[in-house]
Image: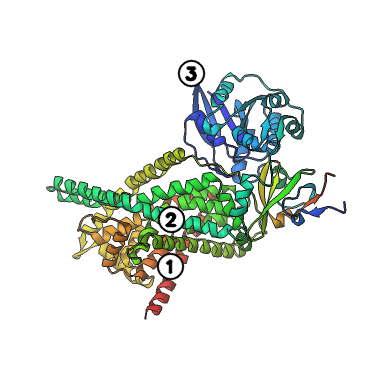
């Protein structure tokens, strides 16, 4: 879909829903941590070096490096 | 005896439940990956015995890192009669995925919904009856930290015999029907704290301030028990010396050698360890360690290392062998090797006490002495961190070249530390452990030193021969032959390095009484130490070969002699080079 954006482009405290995760070495880890299609994700904190962001996902807070979060595509509402 | 496995996501309280069931004292901490190996214990209930095994946390049945592989292998091997799946009530949406996978894989399962109190506080309600109906297994709600629900869990384990039928609902469906979540996600207590502790402006300064504070409390607090212990040991020594007055050799080896070294270890090295450890455990239990990794991620990214290395580095502050084991949570093999090789640049508890003493040499007493020493030790630890980064960078661009790394880490909820548990654990793990090591390692070392000091060849003691042989080289490094000898004899345990140095200098003058570590520093100054000697000794203490225990652990964890040898050589070479440089620069500057 055209209006899917990368998770790194989502402003803090904005809820979005995962549309797709591009193939990458850490995709399996992301899956099992709850980053699956249709899941709601909320960015919460940016770290001091701006290299990683902490996200709320399925009840937990998970920090992801931006280079990994880039592979996650999200949309404003559930597809 | 029935075998029972505790399985679940990381940081759901499996180890706490394990401890409650078995009465054991498995390490617990508030971060994912605290438990990296299996632990077993016996639970006795109504006259029957059960073997309980605590597994490292897993997210799914397809493991990625070393600790997870071990846990899943154990789970899949079908050795267990019963699986207890431990779930975090605050995070059921994700936890239920693993729970439903396990109910499909295994036939005999009990589900334990832990941290139910924390969930209530967050506005999350769990309908455990409905959950039990949908998962088709027994569901026991617990608050393991306060022991609530543990008896119910024991009873459930005791009476469990039915084979459960497979559950047919999806985890999402179960979550939606059984859990009501009214929690404020973006503005709850944890988020407010994180907004400060991980903020762009305050995040890193707060971290440094906390480190400095902990060191200051340690140094300030250690003076008093050190003084008392040394005068106590001094008195005991005098009594013992009189008692054995007729037997010079026994008196020499046992009292002047063994007893004196033991008392140095206990009086000088133990108090800082016993104070630092609980303070550090408070941070660990609070859940602060993963935040450090989050705050420093950009630096780790630059040096191509894994930010989870922060966790193994923090463990290394307690003990490098423990630090090396904790690298199991790092998924990539190359990044794990970097973490293992560089772990020794973090001063362990044993070396940390040495650093305090050495810093006291060039910081004379006075009002702010303990603050100044704290700053000096903070600087030493930070330089250790800096060297870790440099070596990681060099390794990741040469022999351990690999793909860019990822960083995925859970930031756990903040939890109030339990003071009594921390005190109990500190006594057991620091005081008892250090005393044990003192007896095992320091006693023979003390006897050895006495013999070296008292056996003469060509009218010169063996110790002087060895020190004299090492002296020219040690001088280039800014230290002397005795100090270098102490480091070499101290290979089995870093705790004994400074006691050996003191033994070498105080030779036949008996135990020196002192009131604070600063005073002890003065003693070294009397033996021609300058601030340059102290700084070089600090550098070498921070950067030299790992202790024997750590080396054995590295051999076990990497399964390779090559990496063990490198882990020995790299810090030693760095130490020698830095000492030579520091010595040259400081001497030129002093001219």
Locate residue B400, reporting x and y percent.
60, 60
Q: Which quadrant holds residue B223?
A: bottom left
Q: Residue B576 — which label? A: 1
Which structural element holds mark 2? helix
Q: Residues within 10 Å of mark 3 (few under 14, many from 20)?
A: few
| Any part of residue B543 in sight | no
Left or right: where A61 falls relative to B437: right
* Of labels 3 and 2, the one closer to you: 2
Q: Nearer the viewer, residue B120 or B285?
A: B120
- Residue marked by disc 2: B215
Are the residues tagged 1 and 2 within 8 Å (C-beta)?
no
Q: Quadrant of the C terminus of chain A?
A: top right
Measured Cα–Cα span from mark 3 to mark 2: 48 Å
Instruction: Kindly report the distance in space between the C-alpha atoms of the residues bearing marks 1 and 2.
Output: 26 Å
Residue extending farthest to the bottom is B591
* Residue at 70% in and 42% down: A32
Please identify, in this view, whether the residue under mark 1 or under mark 2 is nearer the observer: 2
Residue drawn at 28 percent across, 59 percent down:
B502
Identify which residue, B434 or B462, lies in the foreground: B434
Q: Nearer the viewer, mark 3 or mark 1?
A: 3
Q: Dot 1: within a 10 Å radius of its alpha carbon, few (fewer than 14), some, or many (20 or more) residues? A: many
Compared to residue B496, the image places residue B91 above or below, namely above
Whether callout 1 and callout 2 share a subunit is answered: yes
Farthest residue toward the right?
A2
- Is the residue B573 above or below the residue B25 in the image? below
Seen at 30% across and 48% down, the residue is B443
Marked residue nearer the N-terminal end (1 or 2):
2
Residue B47 disc label: 3
Count of numbered badges drawn on the protein: 3
């Amino acid at each position: 879909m055209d209006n899917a954006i990368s998770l790194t482009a989502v402003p803090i405290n904005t809820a979005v829903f995962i549309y797709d995760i591009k193939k990458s070495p850490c995709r399996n880890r992301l899956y099992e941590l709850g980053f699956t299609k249709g899941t709601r994700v909320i960015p919460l904190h940016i770290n001091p070096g701006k290299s990683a962001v902490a996200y709320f996902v399925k009840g937990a807070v998970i920090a992801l490096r931006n280079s990994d979060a880039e592979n996650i595509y999200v949309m404003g509402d559930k597809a | 005896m029935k075998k029972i496995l505790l399985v679940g996501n990381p940081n759901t309280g499996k180890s706490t439940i394990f401890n409650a069931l078995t009465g054991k004292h498995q390490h617990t901490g508030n971060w994912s990956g605290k438990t990296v190996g299996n632990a077993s214990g016996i639970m006795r209930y109504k006259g029957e015995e059960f073997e309980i095994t605590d597994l490292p946390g897993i997210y799914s049945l397809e493991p990625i890192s070393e600790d997870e592989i071990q846990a899943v292998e154990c789970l899949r091997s079908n050795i267990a009669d019963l699986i207890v799946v431990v779930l975090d009530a605050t995070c059921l949406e994700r936890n239920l995925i693993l729970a439903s996978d396990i109910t499909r894989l295994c036939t005999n399962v009990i589900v334990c919904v832990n941290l139910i109190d924390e969930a209530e506080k967050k506005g999350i309600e769990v309908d455990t009856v409905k959950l039990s109906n949908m998962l088709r297994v027994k569901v026991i709600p617990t608050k393991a930290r306060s022991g609530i629900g543990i008896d119910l869990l024991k009873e459930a384990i005791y009476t469990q015999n039915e084979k459960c039928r497979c559950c047919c609902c999806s985890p999402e469906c179960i979550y939606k029907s059984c859990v009501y979540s009214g929690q404020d996600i973006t503005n709850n207590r944890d988020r407010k704290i994180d907004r400060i502790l991980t903020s762009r402006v305050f995040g890193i300064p707060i971290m440094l301030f906390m480190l400095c504070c902990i060191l200051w409390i340690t140094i300030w607090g250690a003076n008093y028990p050190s003084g008392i212990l040394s005068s106590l040991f001094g008195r005991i020594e005098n009594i013992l010396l009189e008692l054995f007055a007729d037997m010079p050799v026994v008196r020499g080896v046992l009292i002047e050698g063994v007893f004196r070294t033991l008392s140095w270890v206990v009086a000088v090295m133990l108090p800082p360890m016993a104070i630092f450890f609980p303070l550090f455990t408070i941070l660990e239990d609070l859940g602060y360690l993963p935040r450090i990794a989050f705050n420093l991620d950009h630096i780790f990214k630059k040096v191509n290392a894994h930010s989870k290395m922060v966790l193994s580095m923090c463990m290394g502050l307690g003990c490098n062998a423990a630090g090396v084991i904790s690298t199991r949570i790092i998924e990539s093999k190359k990044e794990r090797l970097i973490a293992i090789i560089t772990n020794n640049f973090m001063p362990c508890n044993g070396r940390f006490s040495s650093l305090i003493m050495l810093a006291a040499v060039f910081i004379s007493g006075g009002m702010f002495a303990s603050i100044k020493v704290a700053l000096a030790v903070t600087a030493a630890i930070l330089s250790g961190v800096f060297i870790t980064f440099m070596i990681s960078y060099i390794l990741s661009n040469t022999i351990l070249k690999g793909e860019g790394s990822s960083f995925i880490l859970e930031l756990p909820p903040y939890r109030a530390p339990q003071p009594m548990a921390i005190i109990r654990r500190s006594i057991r793990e620091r005081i008892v452990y250090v005393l044990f090591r003192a007896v095992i390692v320091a006693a023979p070392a003390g006897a050895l030193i006495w013999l070296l000091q008292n056996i003469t060849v060509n009218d010169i003691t063996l110790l002087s021969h060895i020190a004299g042989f090492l002296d020219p080289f040690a001088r280039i490094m800014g230290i002397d032959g005795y100090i270098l000898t102490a480091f070499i004899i101290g290979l089995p345990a870093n705790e004994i390095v400074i006691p050996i140095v003191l033994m070498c200098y105080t030779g036949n003058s008996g135990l020196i009484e002192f009131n604070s570590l600063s005073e002890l520093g003065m003693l070294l100054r009397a033996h021609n130490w300058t601030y340059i000697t102290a700084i070089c000794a600090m550098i070498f203490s921070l950067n030299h070969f790992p202790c024997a225990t750590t080396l054995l652990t590295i051999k076990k964890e990497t399964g390779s002699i090559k990496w063990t040898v490198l882990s020995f050589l790299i810090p030693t070479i760095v130490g020698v080079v830095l000492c030579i440089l520091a010595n040259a620069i400081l001497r030129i500057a002093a001219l």
